Each structure stands twice: as structure tokens, then as C-alpha cells.
Image (spheres, grey):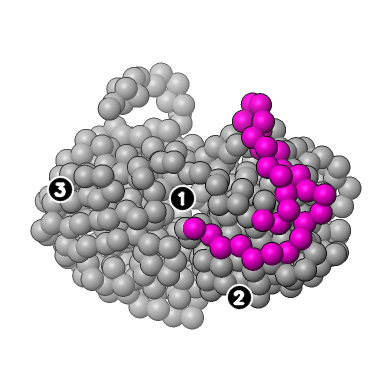
């Protein structure tokens, strides 16, 4: 069993480069199913979610050529399968994007319910609402299979009851080849929504309004291959920004889109950090204890829920009491138990947490409860006194490209270790 071991206390310094966006690539890879030619995709992050996605495509019959670890050529012209099996879909949440892409390609998709991080109920009711509005029939079958089928897809108006990234992406994929005009209202506005729209348009789609609450999609009959580069990862960049501030470091974070980071930058400045924007980089430094602040997670352009565990870790050392309100997921505070093991003073009440800053965290054996909780544990280890050992790190490997090497390059004392004699010291915690 692998674990991450961190000796805390080092300030991060130097520069680090951000990889392609996980949340973009897991939508763009299924979107290649719509093309009748080869798609060359660059700036692909080297993460386990990508490995699984490529395996799913290959299993369907796609021809995949690896140019290098960050560039792939994918030809889906000759695939015949419309099924994603349970043993593959259970490995990541984004496997449900194959429903929209296969429905757009074949008017029929059979995809097992997805896996991925588990931090609350994540229903697909809005996805189903959209598919049915386009003319599909949705059946929840045996072995958790979702069977979605239509004689033909017809453009329509769809209003989501809640802002949902997953359903927005799935309906974009499904409606690209629908006859007529599809209008998505109350759409999600995240950067990866825009990135997917730009990719689809590069293949011949007609999508307008991505990044606003109303997206208009005029169905097209044929899609061609294209060359495309994934945008930088907003959450990876935000994680390094918070890690820098938490360690009272000084880091230039390169290959970013500063506008995507505005909500994170604003809260770090409020904490007392110095944040400077450049064309494609952002400089973060901090030389003091953080101020206490209040944060409420919101859909983009608000503060992202995927940054909540990381900034909570920073605030565990703040002067005074901070309030974190989670408005997106029901159970995203599971990681708090691990921070308390390290000496944090945090009280959770439903979907909010009160963090009373302490002087110091202490290294301890902890686990990564999910992807972003894992990032929070790394930040906690960086700022803790002593040694921190993080288990269940497969969550971290799903979404962070070479995070250990990157952190080492900016001064962290961190390494990956094999632990064949793993004890049960934390497996039964809680």
C-alpha cells in the first residue's frame, strides 16, 4: 500500500507549472466519440482519471496513439460499442459523461452508475430530465446500469432546477447532434464548461453562450477531428496558491488563467497573502499568520467547493474564528476528522464549520477521504510540526499531476513510500 510521507515546516519557494484541467479533460475525452476523424488533444494531465477514461475508450474500440504523456491522438470513427461496464465506470464520477456522448453518437447509451469521490448524495435527476426533454427514454436497469435510448433527439428548451455542472455537460454532449435548437437555462458557468464548448466547436458544433446561464446549441449532423489544448487546471492552481500561503512561502505559479482564480485570490488576500496577477502566471507570498475570514462555496464565479478543504486547512492556523459554509455538497466536511487528529479546532454543524485557529498542527497518520480532502491533508502535512503519513492516496492520484515531484521542486520534504506492512492504525477511525 502506498502512502505519502511529509516532514512539515518547510516554506514553499520558487516556481511551479500547472497541468491541464482535470474537470475539462474528463468531459473532452468522451466528447471525442462524436467525431468522425482523429482528435489530437494536448496539455492532458497525467492522472489516473485520464488513464481510466482512455481505457474506457479503448475498450469501446477507439484507436489511441500516445504522442507523449500529455498528448494523445484519438480516433473513434470505428467504434461500435455503446456500453461502459461497471468495473470501469465505478472508478470515476465523470464516467457518466459517456451517457451524453454515446446518446449523441448512437441515440443509445448503456452506462453503469459512476463511482469517484463520495461526499454526499449526487443524484443524476437533472441529467435524466434533460435526456427525456430531448426525446430519450431513461431506464435504470439491473447492476446499476443506466439505459438511455431515443428514436431521434429533438432540440428543446431545458431549465435545470439547480445549477449543475454534470448535467450541463451531459446535455451539451447529447444535444450537439439533435435536430434543431437546444437551449439550456440555469446552466453551470465553470471554466471547464467553456473549454468543452470550445472543443466541440472545434469539431464543428454550433454552441453559443457557454460561460453564461443560457447556452444555445444548434444540432449539426457531422463532426470532424481537430487539434485542441486543454486549459490549465483552476483547482490545481488554487491548491498550490493555498499551500504557498499556508507555509508562509513565496511561489510563482505558472501556466494559469488568472481570471479563473479571482475568487480564490480574493480570499487569500483577505487572509493576508500578497497575490499578483500576470498574463499567464500568478505570484503568491505570505509572511504572517492568516487572518480569520468567512467563506461560502458557490457555483462559478463564486468560491469553488473543490477548494473548500484546502482553505479550511489554511484557516486552521488563522488568528481568530473562521466560518465555512458549504452550499454545494451535503457531506464535504468528512476530512475535518483528520485535521482534528492533527490538532485543529473545528466544529461542524450540518453544512457549515467553525474553525478556531490554533498555533500549530502536529504530524499524524491520516487518510485522504476524497480527492480534495487528500490535497488538504498534504497542505496540513506541509505546515504541521513533525511527520505526517497520508493513506488512501489513490484519491489524490486521480486528480493531481505529479504533485509529489512538483512540491519537492518548490521545497517540500515529501515522498511516496510503499507500506506493505500497513497497520490498521487509522483504517477504523471514526
Label 3 element class: loop
Q: Earlier in the sequence, mark 1 or mark 3?
A: 3
* Residue at the image position 15 percent from the left and 48 percent from the top: 360
Q: Residue furthest right?
A: 78
* Residue at the image position 52 percent from the left and 51 percent from the top: 401
* Residue at the image position 31 percent from the left and 44 percent from the top: 333
Residue 292, percent from left and from top = 16, 62
Query: Bounds of the magenta span?
Result: 133-161
Drawn side of residue 177 relative to residue 239, left or right:
right
Drawn side of residue 104 relative to residue 311, left or right:
right
Q: Is residue 89 above or below residue 252?
A: above
Which quarter of the figure has residue 362? top left
Label 1 element class: helix
Query: Tag 3: Cα neighbours inside 10 Å, few (<14), some, or many (≥20)?
Result: some
In this view, the mark in front (2 or 1) = 2
| Front residue of this view, candidates 118 and 250 | 118
Which quarter of the figure has residue 193? bottom right
* Disc 2/disc 3 C-alpha distance (Å): 47 Å
| Front residue of this view, candidates 34 and 53 | 34
Q: Which residue is mark 3?
A: 360
Residue 136, percent from left and from top = 73, 49
Amino acid at each position: 500500500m502506498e502512502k505519502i510521507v511529509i516532514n512539515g515546516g518547510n516554506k514553499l519557494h520558487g516556481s511551479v507549472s500547472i497541468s491541464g484541467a482535470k474537470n475539462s479533460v474528463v468531459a473532452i475525452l468522451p466528447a471525442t466519440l462524436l467525431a468522425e476523424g482523429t482528435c489530437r488533444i494536448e496539455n492532458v494531465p497525467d492522472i489516473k482519471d485520464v488513464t481510466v477514461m482512455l481505457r474506457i475508450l479503448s475498450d469501446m474500440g477507439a484507436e489511441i496513439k500516445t504522442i507523449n504523456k500529455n498528448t494523445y491522438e484519438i480516433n473513434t470513427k470505428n467504434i461500435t460499442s455503446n456500453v461502459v461496464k461497471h468495473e470501469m465506470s465505478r472508478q470515476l464520477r465523470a464516467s457518466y459523461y459517456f451517457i451524453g456522448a454515446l446518446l449523441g453518437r448512437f441515440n443509445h447509451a448503456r452506462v453503469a452508475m459512476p463511482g469517484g469521490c463520495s461526499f454526499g448524495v449526487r443524484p443524476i435527476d437533472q441529467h435524466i430530465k434533460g435526456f427525456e426533454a430531448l426525446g430519450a427514454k431513461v431506464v435504470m436497469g439491473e447492476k446499476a446500469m443506466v439505459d438511455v435510448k431515443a428514436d431521434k433527439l429533438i432540440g428543446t428548451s431545458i431549465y435545470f432546477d439547480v445549477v449543475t455542472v454534470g448535467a450541463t455537460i451531459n446535455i451539451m454532449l447529447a444535444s450537439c447532434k439533435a435536430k434543431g435548437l437546444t437551449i439550456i437555462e440555469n446552466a453551470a458557468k465553470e471554466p471547464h464548461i467553456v473549454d468543452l464548448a470550445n472543443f466541440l466547436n472545434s469539431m464543428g458544433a454550433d454552441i453559443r453562450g457557454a460561460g453564461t446561464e443560457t447556452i444555445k446549441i444548434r444540432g449539426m449532423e457531422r463532426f470532424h477531428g481537430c487539434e485542441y489544448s486543454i486549459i490549465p487546471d483552476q483547482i490545481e492552481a488554487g491548491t498550490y496558491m493555498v499551500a504557498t500561503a499556508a507555509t508562509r512561502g513565496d511561489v510563482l505559479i505558472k501556466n494559469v488563467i488568472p481570471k479563473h482564480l479571482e475568487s480564490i485570490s480574493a480570499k487569500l488576500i483577505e487572509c493576508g497573502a500578497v497575490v499578483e496577477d500576470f498574463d499567464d502566471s500568478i505570484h503568491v507570498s505570505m509572511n504572517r499568520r492568516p487572518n480569520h475570514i468567512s467563506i461560502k462555496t458557490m457555483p462559478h464565479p463564486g468560491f469553488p467547493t473543490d477548494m473548500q478543504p484546502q482553505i479550511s486547512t489554511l484557516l486552521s492556523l488563522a488568528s481568530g474564528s473562521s466560518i465555512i459554509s458549504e452550499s454545494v455538497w451535503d457531506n464535504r466536511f468528512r476530512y475535518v476528522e483528520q485535521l482534528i487528529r492533527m490538532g485543529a479546532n473545528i466544529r461542524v454543524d450540518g453544512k457549515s464549520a467553525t474553525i478556531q485557529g490554533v498555533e500549530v498542527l502536529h504530524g499524524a497518520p491520516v487518510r485522504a477521504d476524497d480527492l480534495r480532502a487528500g490535497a488538504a491533508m498534504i497542505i496540513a502535512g506541509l505546515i504541521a510540526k513533525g511527520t505526517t503519513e497520508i493513506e488512501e492516496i489513490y484519491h489524490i492520484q486521480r486528480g493531481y499531476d505529479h504533485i509529489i515531484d512538483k512540491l519537492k521542486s518548490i521545497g517540500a520534504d515529501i515522498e511516496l513510500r510503499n507500506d506493505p506492512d500497513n497497520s490498521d492504525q487509522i483504517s477504523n477511525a471514526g
